[in-house]
Image: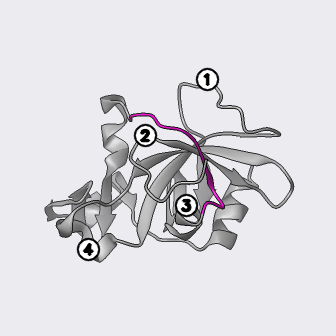
Amino acid sequence: MKTSKLNAGDVFSIPMNDGRFAIAQVIWMPSGESSSKFRNVFSFAVLSIQNNQEIPIVNDYLVFNNYRGDFKVIFTSKEKILNGEWVLLKRDELSNVHDNLRFFNNAGDLYFLDEHVRKLTVSEYKDYNIMAVVGYELVQQYLSQY
Protein backbone atom coordinates (compact mmCIF):
# COMPACT_ATOMS: atom_id res chain seq x y z
CA MET A 1 0.00 0.00 0.00
CA LYS A 2 1.84 3.10 -1.24
CA THR A 3 0.97 6.34 0.49
CA SER A 4 2.19 9.88 0.68
CA LYS A 5 0.83 10.65 4.13
CA LEU A 6 1.27 8.69 7.30
CA ASN A 7 0.08 9.64 10.76
CA ALA A 8 1.13 8.80 14.28
CA GLY A 9 0.20 5.20 14.99
CA ASP A 10 0.42 3.93 11.42
CA VAL A 11 2.39 0.70 11.03
CA PHE A 12 4.88 0.26 8.18
CA SER A 13 7.69 -2.05 7.12
CA ILE A 14 11.34 -1.27 6.49
CA PRO A 15 13.20 -3.72 4.23
CA MET A 16 16.52 -4.57 5.86
CA ASN A 17 19.81 -5.14 4.08
CA ASP A 18 19.83 -8.80 5.19
CA GLY A 19 16.40 -9.58 3.69
CA ARG A 20 14.40 -9.30 6.90
CA PHE A 21 11.84 -6.61 7.71
CA ALA A 22 11.53 -4.17 10.56
CA ILE A 23 7.89 -3.63 11.45
CA ALA A 24 7.65 -0.12 12.83
CA GLN A 25 5.09 2.37 14.08
CA VAL A 26 5.04 6.10 13.45
CA ILE A 27 5.47 7.97 16.74
CA TRP A 28 5.46 11.51 15.37
CA MET A 29 4.71 12.90 11.93
CA PRO A 30 4.88 16.71 11.75
CA SER A 31 1.72 18.42 10.58
CA GLY A 32 0.49 21.95 10.09
CA GLU A 33 2.21 25.30 9.75
CA SER A 34 3.86 25.24 13.18
CA SER A 35 5.98 22.27 12.13
CA SER A 36 7.57 23.82 9.05
CA LYS A 37 11.02 23.58 10.65
CA PHE A 38 10.49 19.82 11.06
CA ARG A 39 8.70 19.18 7.76
CA ASN A 40 11.24 16.66 6.38
CA VAL A 41 11.63 14.38 9.40
CA PHE A 42 9.51 12.00 11.45
CA SER A 43 10.03 9.55 14.29
CA PHE A 44 9.20 5.89 14.67
CA ALA A 45 9.70 2.95 17.00
CA VAL A 46 10.23 -0.67 15.99
CA LEU A 47 7.74 -3.35 16.98
CA SER A 48 9.64 -6.34 15.59
CA ILE A 49 12.41 -7.58 13.31
CA GLN A 50 11.20 -10.58 11.32
CA ASN A 51 11.28 -12.53 8.06
CA ASN A 52 7.85 -11.37 6.83
CA GLN A 53 5.67 -8.27 6.82
CA GLU A 54 2.95 -9.57 9.13
CA ILE A 55 2.06 -7.18 11.91
CA PRO A 56 3.14 -8.71 15.23
CA ILE A 57 1.16 -8.55 18.45
CA VAL A 58 3.59 -6.97 20.90
CA ASN A 59 3.32 -4.80 24.00
CA ASP A 60 6.45 -2.70 23.67
CA TYR A 61 9.03 -1.41 21.24
CA LEU A 62 12.52 -2.76 20.67
CA VAL A 63 15.37 -1.01 22.47
CA PHE A 64 18.44 0.07 20.50
CA ASN A 65 21.80 1.30 21.70
CA ASN A 66 24.24 3.97 20.60
CA TYR A 67 26.95 6.05 22.26
CA ARG A 68 24.30 7.93 24.29
CA GLY A 69 22.77 4.74 25.68
CA ASP A 70 19.49 2.93 25.13
CA PHE A 71 16.62 4.38 23.09
CA LYS A 72 13.38 3.32 21.41
CA VAL A 73 12.60 6.25 19.08
CA ILE A 74 14.44 6.88 15.80
CA PHE A 75 14.25 10.18 13.89
CA THR A 76 14.95 10.15 10.16
CA SER A 77 13.90 11.67 6.84
CA LYS A 78 10.40 11.12 5.41
CA GLU A 79 11.76 10.34 1.93
CA LYS A 80 11.42 6.54 2.01
CA ILE A 81 7.95 6.81 3.52
CA LEU A 82 6.83 9.30 0.89
CA ASN A 83 8.24 7.36 -2.07
CA GLY A 84 6.73 4.06 -0.88
CA GLU A 85 10.01 2.21 -0.28
CA TRP A 86 8.95 1.85 3.34
CA VAL A 87 5.50 0.32 2.95
CA LEU A 88 2.39 1.24 4.92
CA LEU A 89 0.90 -1.95 6.38
CA LYS A 90 -1.92 -0.65 8.55
CA ARG A 91 -3.60 2.60 9.53
CA ASP A 92 -3.63 2.71 13.31
CA GLU A 93 -3.60 5.12 16.23
CA LEU A 94 -1.02 5.61 18.93
CA SER A 95 -2.39 5.09 22.41
CA ASN A 96 -1.86 7.63 25.18
CA VAL A 97 0.34 5.03 26.89
CA HIS A 98 3.04 6.13 24.44
CA ASP A 99 2.75 9.87 25.14
CA ASN A 100 6.20 9.91 26.76
CA LEU A 101 7.71 8.88 23.41
CA ARG A 102 6.17 11.95 21.75
CA PHE A 103 8.33 14.33 23.78
CA PHE A 104 11.71 15.17 22.31
CA ASN A 105 14.68 17.43 22.87
CA ASN A 106 15.68 19.59 19.92
CA ALA A 107 18.75 21.73 20.65
CA GLY A 108 17.80 22.12 24.30
CA ASP A 109 14.14 22.85 23.65
CA LEU A 110 11.47 20.38 24.75
CA TYR A 111 8.74 19.62 22.22
CA PHE A 112 5.58 17.55 22.48
CA LEU A 113 4.70 16.63 18.92
CA ASP A 114 4.90 19.91 16.95
CA GLU A 115 4.51 22.18 19.97
CA HIS A 116 7.36 23.84 21.83
CA VAL A 117 6.93 23.18 25.56
CA ARG A 118 9.89 24.91 27.22
CA LYS A 119 13.66 25.19 27.48
CA LEU A 120 15.35 22.23 29.14
CA THR A 121 18.07 22.44 31.74
CA VAL A 122 21.20 20.55 30.75
CA SER A 123 20.53 18.00 33.50
CA GLU A 124 17.14 17.20 31.87
CA TYR A 125 18.56 16.37 28.43
CA LYS A 126 18.95 12.70 29.34
CA ASP A 127 15.27 12.44 30.31
CA TYR A 128 13.94 12.95 26.78
CA ASN A 129 14.41 11.51 23.32
CA ILE A 130 16.95 13.57 21.42
CA MET A 131 15.98 14.57 17.92
CA ALA A 132 19.18 13.24 16.39
CA VAL A 133 18.09 12.76 12.78
CA VAL A 134 19.93 9.77 11.33
CA GLY A 135 20.53 8.71 7.75
CA TYR A 136 19.19 5.51 6.26
CA GLU A 137 22.46 3.61 6.66
CA LEU A 138 22.48 4.32 10.39
CA VAL A 139 18.83 3.21 10.57
CA GLN A 140 19.97 -0.09 9.02
CA GLN A 141 22.79 -0.37 11.57
CA TYR A 142 20.37 0.15 14.45
CA LEU A 143 17.98 -2.45 13.03
CA SER A 144 20.80 -4.96 12.60
CA GLN A 145 21.31 -4.96 16.38
CA TYR A 146 18.58 -7.65 16.34
Which-is-in-front pick, marks 3 and 1? 3
Which amino acid, by three-letter code, is at mark 1?
A: Ile
Residue denoted by label 3: 81
Task: Say which residue label 2 marks.
Answer: 9
What's the amino acid at mark 2? Gly
Which residue is more in the foreground, 62 or 90? 90
Q: Main secondary structure of the magenta part?
A: loop
**Image height check: is 19 above or below 141?**
above
The structure residue drawn at horizontal position 59% and vertical position 25%, both measured from the top left corner, is: 58
Asked if residue 85 is among those painted magenta in the image, a careful observer would answer: yes
Q: CA distance from mark 3 to mark 4?
A: 18 Å
Q: Which mark is residue 36?
A: 4
Determine which of the numbered discs, if any, sits on residue 129 in the image.
none
Location of residue 55 in the rendering, given as x and y in whole percent from the top left corner: 65, 31
Neighbor class of circle 3 (other Cα within 10 Å; few <14, some 14-19, many 20+) is many
Q: Which residue is mark 1?
A: 57
Residue 120, relative to residue 47: is it above or below?
Answer: below
Nearer-N-terminus badge (4/1)? 4
**Residue 44 location in percent, x, y?**
49, 51
**Seen in the image, is 99 located left or right of residue 40?**
left
The kind of secondary structure element at disc 2 is: loop
In the image, which residues are magenta?
84-93
